[in-house]
Image: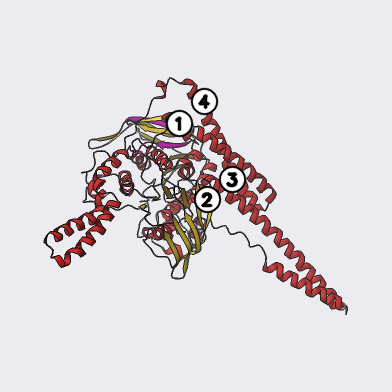
């Protein structure tokens, strides 16, 4: 369907891609992964014609239609939903009307030329089914949960609804290849579950750029990884890619070490033969020396390269000041409203010291409002938002407004205490910031850079009560994993808001759900809460939740108690195996780092078997 041949892309002296070749096949679900800034979006822009390659070719089969939903969606806010949906047809329909007007008044000498052009435009219009576009637009919007919105101004839509509108617009053209750049942005759990099911059921080819590991696992059957300025192709979902990538690194390192030992052994023989040849006049030793030198040169020429690890994981360690307190947070009769919009009504909850809790709820339910109030107003003397007296809050903001956009990174970090420039750099260096970055104004940083800077700030402050609002937003997968690992070792209290299901599964052991203006506690992992709240997996024909339309079925009304018990057993097994899988991946990394290749290979085999078993369980859930 699409054939990329010997493609290279340069920006000045910077090489983004160097002589890559790959194919995108019909009906295939592919994930495109790699660290931030590696060129994923650039590759998509070249495929869609938004940018030209520096060298090489991108061959798209004739009549292949591509639908593209970018990461950052911009619409003319003055347009209605209908007008946005009809934009791809507008220029063609306008030209058809103009040509019809010209035909009615054209002289005979020009008529044939106008008729030919009219037929060309008409063929294009028919190819994208322009005559039925309005009706199909309404049906697509209805199926995506935006029913009755055709005349609604775009400016009144939420971020999630705009995301859905962009997908609807792409689907209207019936693309053979649907390209989605971070498609889960602005969607809540219901919306993400719907998206997973929709993409799984979608019959055409899909290319997904995403840091959502759960989405990549559930949807993709192939992973293209951008590593350095090359691409590597892996069959299977994201978990299989990670497993095979780890195995490959272990094997490469083992081959490299063995080759280095061989080179050192030959080098030692060269030195020994040199000494003997110098000490004797025997021509035979001179011949042996030349032969050994030739052998060394040949071995050096064919030496195994040191395996390149393109992924640079940030290093972090959240150290909490110890506390003997029992209560970290008490919420007593919290109410909040904005005009007619009531978010909370006499809500109450309690978090004990050392607990790791996720605050869950649909978009627009007030999660961020609540945690902002806790950060600003929470203290031991408060009647409503009571924070333990020995607890110090460390806050990571979703919107990253804690930084002054005119201040540099150096200014922000040195402002935390009496720090020298060198001390400030030591704080941010583990988060992949350079000396040159210290002079950057925070207003010029990317979303991922701002989140890394927020994490560096929290590490320095050593707070014992972390309140994190979407901490993995804008982070690549490896950085998200680093945050997960650091939080797993964190001995303080954690309250986190996140739409990253994979992240929550690894970090929290209790859920507080915002439901109908109240705070409802659930003891257990995210997957257990999700299964109990949504016993029937959302289907693609259902409605997508982009704001507060969180409907659920009551499990107590289920007549099949046996199925419910079986589901609980499955959930428990999945939770245990996910933990074991995470520990195995960490152990393989450790073995690779320490050069224990035998152990690394043994663990890789175990990981492969565990991943297959885990996939079977997920399919049965």
In this picture, residue 85 sits left or right of residue 519:
left
How many angstroms separate mark 3 from mark 1 (CA)?
26 Å
Q: Position of residue 502 (x, y in %)?
A: 48, 41
Tell me if residue 336 is in the magenta stretch: no
Q: Which residue is mark 2?
A: 316
Q: Secondary structure at mark 1?
A: helix
Q: Is residue 201 above or below residue 119?
A: above
* Quadrant holding the N terminus: bottom left
Q: Secondary structure at mark 4?
A: helix
Q: Which residue is mark 1?
A: 531
- Label 3 CA crowd tier, 10 Å (few <14, some 14–19, many 20+): some
Q: Which residue is mark 3?
A: 585
Q: Earlier in the sequence, mark 3 or mark 1?
A: 1
Looking at the rendered image, the disc whose residue lies closer to the viewer, 4 or 1, is: 4
How many angstroms separate mark 1 from mark 2 (CA)?
32 Å
Q: Is residue 120 above or below residue 481?
A: below
Q: Earlier in the sequence, mark 1 or mark 2?
A: 2
Instruction: Report the magenta residues as a range.
Output: 343-366
How many angstroms separate mark 2 from mark 3 (CA)?
18 Å
Q: Earlier in the sequence, mark 2 or mark 3?
A: 2
Q: Earlier in the sequence, mark 4 or mark 1?
A: 1
- Label 1 CA crowd tier, 10 Å (few <14, some 14–19, many 20+): some
């Amino acid at each position: 369907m699409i054939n990329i041949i010997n493609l290279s892309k340069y920006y000045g002296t910077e090489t983004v891609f160097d002589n890559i070749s790959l194919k995108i096949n019909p009906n295939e679900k592919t994930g495109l992964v790699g660290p931030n800034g590696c060129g994923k979006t650039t590759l998509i822009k070249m495929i869609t014609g938004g940018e030209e390659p520096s060298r090489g070719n991108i061959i798209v089969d004739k009549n292949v239609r591509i639908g593209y939903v970018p990461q950052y969606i911009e619409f003319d806010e003055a347009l209605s939903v209908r007008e946005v949906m009809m934009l791809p047809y507008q220029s063609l329909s306008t030209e058809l009307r103009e040509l019809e007007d010209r035909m009615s008044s054209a002289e005979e000498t020009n008529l044939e030329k106008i008729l030919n052009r009219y037929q060309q435009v008409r063929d294009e219009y028919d190819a994208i089914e322009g005559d039925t576009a309005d009706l199909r637009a309404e049906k697509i919007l209805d199926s995506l949960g935006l029913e009755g919105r055709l005349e609604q101004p775009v400016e009144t839509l939420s971020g999630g609804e705009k995301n859905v509108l962009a997908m609807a617009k792409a689907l209207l053209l019936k693309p053979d290849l649907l390209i989605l750049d971070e498609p889960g942005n602005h969607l809540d759990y219901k919306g993400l579950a719907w998206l997973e099911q929709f993409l799984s059921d979608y019959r055409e080819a899909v290319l997904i750029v995403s840091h959502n590991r759960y989405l990549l696992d559930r949807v993709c059957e192939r992973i293209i990884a951008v590593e350095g300025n090359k691409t590597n192709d892996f069959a299977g979902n994201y978990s299989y890619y990670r497993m095979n990538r780890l195995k490959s690194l272990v094997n490469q390192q083992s081959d490299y070490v063995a080759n280095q030992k061989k080179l050192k052994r030959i080098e030692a023989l060269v030195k020994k033969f040199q000494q003997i040849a110098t000490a004797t006049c025997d021509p035979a030793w001179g011949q042996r020396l030349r032969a050994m030198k030739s052998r060394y040169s040949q071995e050096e020429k064919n030496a195994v390269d040191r395996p390149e690890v393109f992924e640079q994981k940030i290093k972090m360690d959240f150290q909490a000041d110890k506390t003997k307190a029992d209560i970290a947070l008490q919420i007593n009769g919290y109410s909040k409203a904005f005009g007619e919009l009531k978010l909370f009504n006499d809500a109450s909850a309690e978090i004990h010291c050392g607990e790791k809790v996720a605050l869950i709820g649909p978009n627009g339910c007030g999660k961020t409002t609540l945690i902002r109030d806790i950060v600003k107003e929470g203290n031991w003397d408060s009647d409503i938002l009571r924070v333990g007296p020995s607890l110090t809050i460390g806050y990571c903001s979703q919107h990253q407004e804690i930084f002054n956009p005119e201040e540099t990174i150096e200014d922000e970090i040195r402002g935390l205490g009496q720090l020298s420039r060198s001390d400030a750099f030591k704080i941010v260096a583990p988060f992949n910031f350079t000396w040159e970055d210290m002079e950057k104004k925070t207003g010029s940083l990317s979303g991922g850079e701002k989140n890394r800077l927020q994490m560096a700030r929290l590490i320095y402050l050593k707070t014992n009560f972390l309140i994190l609002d979407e901490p993995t937003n804008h982070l690549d997968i490896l950085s998200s994993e680093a945050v997960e690992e650091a939080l797993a070792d964190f001995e303080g209290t954690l309250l986190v808001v996140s739409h990253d299901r994979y992240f929550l599964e690894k970090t929290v052991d209790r859920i507080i759900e915002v439901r109908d203006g109240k705070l409802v506690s659930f003891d257990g992992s995210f997957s257990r809460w999700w299964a109990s709240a949504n016993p029937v997996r959302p289907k693609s024909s259902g409605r997508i939740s982009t704001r507060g339309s969180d409907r659920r079925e009551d499990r107590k009304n289920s007549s099949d108690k046996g199925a419910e018990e079986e589901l609980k057993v499955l959930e428990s097994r999945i939770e245990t195996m996910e933990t074991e899988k995470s520990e195995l991946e960490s152990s393989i990394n450790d073995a690779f780092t320490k050069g224990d290749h035998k152990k690394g290979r043994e663990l890789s085999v175990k990981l492969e078997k565990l991943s297959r078993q885990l996939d079977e369980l997920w399919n049965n859930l």
